[in-house]
Amino acid sequence: MKMPVWFVFVLGALSAAGEVFVAKVGGKVTLKCGVSSYRRSLQWHHGNDFLHSVDQRGFPRKGSAELVQRSVVRQTNLEISSVRETDAGRFTCSADGTRREHTLSVFSVLVSVKPSAVLKLNDEATLQCEVKGQHHGCEVKWRSPNTYSLTNTSTVQLKPVKTSHNGPWLCIVTCGRNTFSERLAITVQEPPTTTKSPPKLNGKSEKPCGTNCGNDDASPRLLGLAWWVWVAIGVGCLVAILLMVCVIVLCVRVKRRKKRFLKMKGQQRPRHKKYCQCDHPTAAAKPKQGRRREKPSALPLHPA
């Protein structure tokens, strides 16, 4: 009688056993429930916090934990984005009353280079890939920019720094079937080329040529310009002034001629008289009849 009971208990324990998922801080991870479908309800918990539940009609219900805002249920799986270190721990998926517990391991990758990311040729540098919250069984390797060979250590010594070290380095973290990488850019600068000093003549080094190079007799300068430059500037200004005066004189003459022409044109305009033209023949002119002046009558003589 004990044998069937133990057999059923072992089967239940195996069915409830979950998986271990690994995620990188800031990345994305999908937790599989372990079932492809359900009939009544599906629930997800993070520790003791309720996250999501979906009933048989497909109506979702969400909890109040902060992780709810960054997670979503797709079919039966729980998808988490922008993973944080606080998301690590135990997750429980309940499908139709059957519980399956899963574990999420979260780690972060910090890459650095000393003394700095800008290196000089033939110097020395140290590359460090630090994994915090590392899951057991993870491996850390470095990949150089110009080769595909991997260095099976988290620390790489560059002694000395070469031009082949210039470019992006990758820190690769492998946890079982999951692989993560972090990029580190390194710039290698070549030393500046030194210029040779001019040869010495008679035990004295030549002085560098200045603005008067090639002119033994340096002419006096005003504001850094030679005398002939100032002469050229003065002649140019004089020519410009003369041109302006000529233009002004021409404009004045043109205006005077225009006024004179308009005045003469107004005086020569003919004034036409308007006469009435009739079709009737003109009447014969009447002879002028002047009034005859009558001689005044003699005054009557009165007797004295």
Image (cartoon, grey):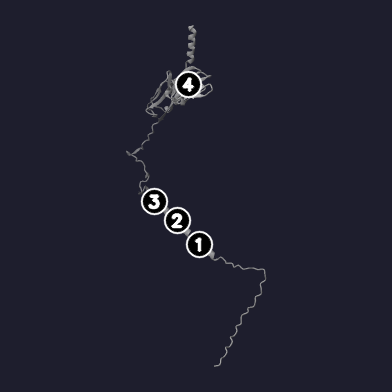
Residue labelled with disc 3: 230
Circle nearer the N terminus (4, 1): 4
- Residue with the most extreme bottom position: 304
Circle nearer the N terminus (1, 2): 2
**Residue type indicated by callout 4:** Trp
Residue 81's place in the image compared with 14, above or below, is below
Circle nearer the N terminus (3, 1): 3
Q: Are marks 3 and 1 in contact (CB under 8 Å)?
A: no
Q: Quadrant of the C terminus?
A: bottom right
Q: Are marks 4 and 2 in contact (CB under 8 Å)?
A: no
Q: Residues within 10 Å of mark 2 (few under 14, many from 20)?
A: few
Secondary-structure class at tag 3: helix
The span from disc 4 to disc 2 (Cα, nearest Å) is 93 Å
Residue labelled with disc 2: 244
Instruction: Between label 4 and label 1, give the one nearer the viewer.
Output: 4
Instruction: Between label 2 and label 3, give the one nearer the viewer.
Output: 2
Secondary-structure class at tag 4: strand
Residue labelled with disc 1: 259
- How many numbered discs sit on the rendered protein? 4
Q: Return the x and y of residue 89 as percentages of the image width and height.
A: 43, 20
Instruction: Between label 3 and label 4, give the one nearer the viewer.
Output: 4
Residue 13's place in the image compared with 53, above or below, is above
- Residue at left 47%, top 21%? 44
Residue labelled with disc 4: 44
Q: Residues within 10 Å of mark 1 (few under 14, many from 20)?
A: few
Q: Return the x and y of residue 258 as percentages of the image width and height.
A: 51, 61
